[in-house]
Amino acid sequence: MDDSNRRQHPRAPIELKVEYRRLNTFFADYTKNISRGGTFIKTDNPLKVGTEFIFKLLIPSLKEPITLHGQVKWTVSTGEATADSPAGMGIKFIYTNQDERDLVENKVERLMIDSLGEHLYAKLLRKSSAPPKTR
């Protein structure tokens, strides 16, 4: 499945530190990109598809990391990885209520705007909301 079929929201190429636990082991990896609906975490040891976990997203402009609940939707193993598609896992954010969704989506949107600038972010949104091209 290619990236365009997996994604419901436009993504920005933003690298942020991510911290999470698996069993009794602590992991610190980095995002490759992020959207309002999820992120891709670069790691040589992705969790299994369907795994739900809590992770912290460390954003330099915020004093405290954002704690998020996510579910692994797809993975790229080290054997499948390429320069354009590194090993890791695609994460869908899971929210307990609409207020939490709004808070996280607003923070992610602000992060994307700060990283890309208003003009590029607006272009990214227009591109992602355009109807699919037919041949």
Image (spheres, grey):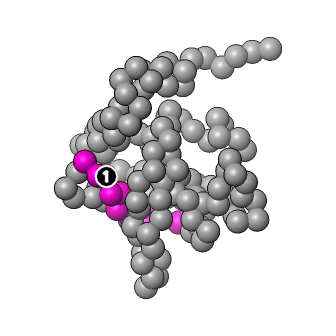
Image: magenta residue range: 50-61
Question: Residue at the spot x=35%, y=57% of the render?
Answer: 57
Above or below, 45 against 133 in this view is below
The image quarter in which residue 75 lies: bottom right
Regarding residue 110, the answer to whether it shows in the image is: yes
Secondary element at tag 1: loop
Q: Residue 18: say if magenta.
A: no
Indicate the position of residue 126 as horizontal and vertical percent values.
49, 18
Question: Residue at the spot x=33%, y=35% of the render?
Answer: 114
The residue sitting at the left extreme is 63
Indicate the position of residue 95 as horizontal and vertical percent values.
35, 50
Local crowd at mark 1 within 10 Å, few (<14), some, or many (≥20)? some
Q: Tell which of 68 and 95 is nearer to you.
A: 68
The image quarter in which residue 110 lies: top left
> Quarter holding the N terminus?
top right
Left or right: 92 as drawn, with respect to 63: right
Indicate the position of residue 17 as horizontal and vertical percent values.
40, 59
- Amino acid type of the residue that numbered disc 1 sits on in the rendered structure: Ile
Regarding residue 109, the answer to whether it shows in the image is: no
The residue labelled by disc 1 is 59
Left or right: 48 as drawn, with respect to 9: right
